[in-house]
Image (tube, grey):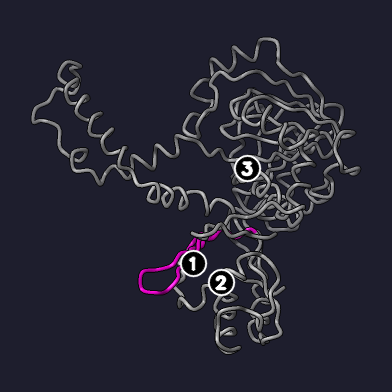
């Protein structure tokens, strides 16, 4: 995956390579522009397998045999597995324990206990597959680049005829990708449009239950290879049909205007008027007493908001969003070997999916900000950095702006060690 440079400030975000466009095309049977205009955050979209490009459905991402391997041979620990039965989560102690000699940690998934629960009708939820299963790691990174949003991927394994969770809504958008078996979905309109993460469905359980008793907006059975998009807030329930069901749920974390408000309020602590104490003895329960304080506070907040620094807000949003999407995995042993063998003929490229910001510093240096740290480098490195950050494969000896290969090797080694670059 490539990364592009936004001149002149040098704000980098993952570009949308062909693999990212293909990842989105696997999830929606309409053009990206139509999906964005008609469905994104607005309405559900059902895409049948025959309308989608992959003839094999989604088994290349995770098959039932792959799920069995995760449950039995990969040493999973909580919270990478949840179990639900009759609409409730099963306590983890009922399916975890020590892993035997040399693996005595007590929260490891025990396959025989999982078997007993699954055979009794429980739904198994494999969580965080965008971090644990290679095919989904790559798919999630590509789809995240296409959507420019952080996302997560879980798998739901439901026995025949069972329903893991009661009707509910999510506080994030989802793609449902049916891998194996068939599942009956009932979709109802929101009781709360665009809910925030702090507004889960449990706080509106009565409204959700009442709405779920009405006629669904969408009543469909998903078969292998089918995909369903649901905006956050839409009510849904799902029941496996005549055989067991396996589907993937891609959860897309919402980036909202409220997040901007939160960061603005955090920055408002810099304003002395807003830090001022309320009057001594003020009766907080008396609306008449509160009114003048409220008026003055709103005026102070309005004045401060008009002076808000976009760069400061962007910095806080960056710190919130960038860590939520991991860049492409690196291989520590191979990376260390590349460091040891590095020479002027070595080829390197920027790490796929890496978020970055390159800016000149006041002292003639340049700063390269990545999600978890900031690197300060000589100003003479700027041309070479910009060449590298375009995402193109580059021969170390061809890096521009530096006097000799020794300087180029110093820079390349530093960036390889910092996992900004990878061997091409």
Helix or strand or loop: what does disc 2 sit on? helix
Going from N to C along the chain, the mark reached first, 2 or 1, is: 1
Few, some or many residues within 10 Å of mark 3 (<14, 14–19, 20+) = few
* Marker disc for residue 94: 3
Q: Which residues are magenta?
A: 353-372
Q: Position of residue 378 (x, y in %)?
A: 45, 78
Residue 104's image quarter? bottom right
Residue 233's image quarter? top right
Going from N to C along the chain, the mark reached first, 2 or 3, is: 3
Q: Do the CB atoms of the residues marked 3 and 1 lie less than 8 Å apart?
A: no
Q: Report the mark closest to the observer, 2 or 1.
A: 2
Which residue is the site of mark 1? 368
Q: Do the CB atoms of the residues marked 2 and 1 lie less than 8 Å apart?
A: yes
Instruction: Residue at 62%, 59% (x, y): give it.
Output: 4
* Marker disc for residue 385: 2
Instruction: Residue at 33%, 39% (x, y): give it.
Output: 265
Instruction: Residue at 75%, 47% (x, y): give it.
Output: 21
Residue 118, compared with residue 281, is above or below; it is below
């Amino acid at each position: 995956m490539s990364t592009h440079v936004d001149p002149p400030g040098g704000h980098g975000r993952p570009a949308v390579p062909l693999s990212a466009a293909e990842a989105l095309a696997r999830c929606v049977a309409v053009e990206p522009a139509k999906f964005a205009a008609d469905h994104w955050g607005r309405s559900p979209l059902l895409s049948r397998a025959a309308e989608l490009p992959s003839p094999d459905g989604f088994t290349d991402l995770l098959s039932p045999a792959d799920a069995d391997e995760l449950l039995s041979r990969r040493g999973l620990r909580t919270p990478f597995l949840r179990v639900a039965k009759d609409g409730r989560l099963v306590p983890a102690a009922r399916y975890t324990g020590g892993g035997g000699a040399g693996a005595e940690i007590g929260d490891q998934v025990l396959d025989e206990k999982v078997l007993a629960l699954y055979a009794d009708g429980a739904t198994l939820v494999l969580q965080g597959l965008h971090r644990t299963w290679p095919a989904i790691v790559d798919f999630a990174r590509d789809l995240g680049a296409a959507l420019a949003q952080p996302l997560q991927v879980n798998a739901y394994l439901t026995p025949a005829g069972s329903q893991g969770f009661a009707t509910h809504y999510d506080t994030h958008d989802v793609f449902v990708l049916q891998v194996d078996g068939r599942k009956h979905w009932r979709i109802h309109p929101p009781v709360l449009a665009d809910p925030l993460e702090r507004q889960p469905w449990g706080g509106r359980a009565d409204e959700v239950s009442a709405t779920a008793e009405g006629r669904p907006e969408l009543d469909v059975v998903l078969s292998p290879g089918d995909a369903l998009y649901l905006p956050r807030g839409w009510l849904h329930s799902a029941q496996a049909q005549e055989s067991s069901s396996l589907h993937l749920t891609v959860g897309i974390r919402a980036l909202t205007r409220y997040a901007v408000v939160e960061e603005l309020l955090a920055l408002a602590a810099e304003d002395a008027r807003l830090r001022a104490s309320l009057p001594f003895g003020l009766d907080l329960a008396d609306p008449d007493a509160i009114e003048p304080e409220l008026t003055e506070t709103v005026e102070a907040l309005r004045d401060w908001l008009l002076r808000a620094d976009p760069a400061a807000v962007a910095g806080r949003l960056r710190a919130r969003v960038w860590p939520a999407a991991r860049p492409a995995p690196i291989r520590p042993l191979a990376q260390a070997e590349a460091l040891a063998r590095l020479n002027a003929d070595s080829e390197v490229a920027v790490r796929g999916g890496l978020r970055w910001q390159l800016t000149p510093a006041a002292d003639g240096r340049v700063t390269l900000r990545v999600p978890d740290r900031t690197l300060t480098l000589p100003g003479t490195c700027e041309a070479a950095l910009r060449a590298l950050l375009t995402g193109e494969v580059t021969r170390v000896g061809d890096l521009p702006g530096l006097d000799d290969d020794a300087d180029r090797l110093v820079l390349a080694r530093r960036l390889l060690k910092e996992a900004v670059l990878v061997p091409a």
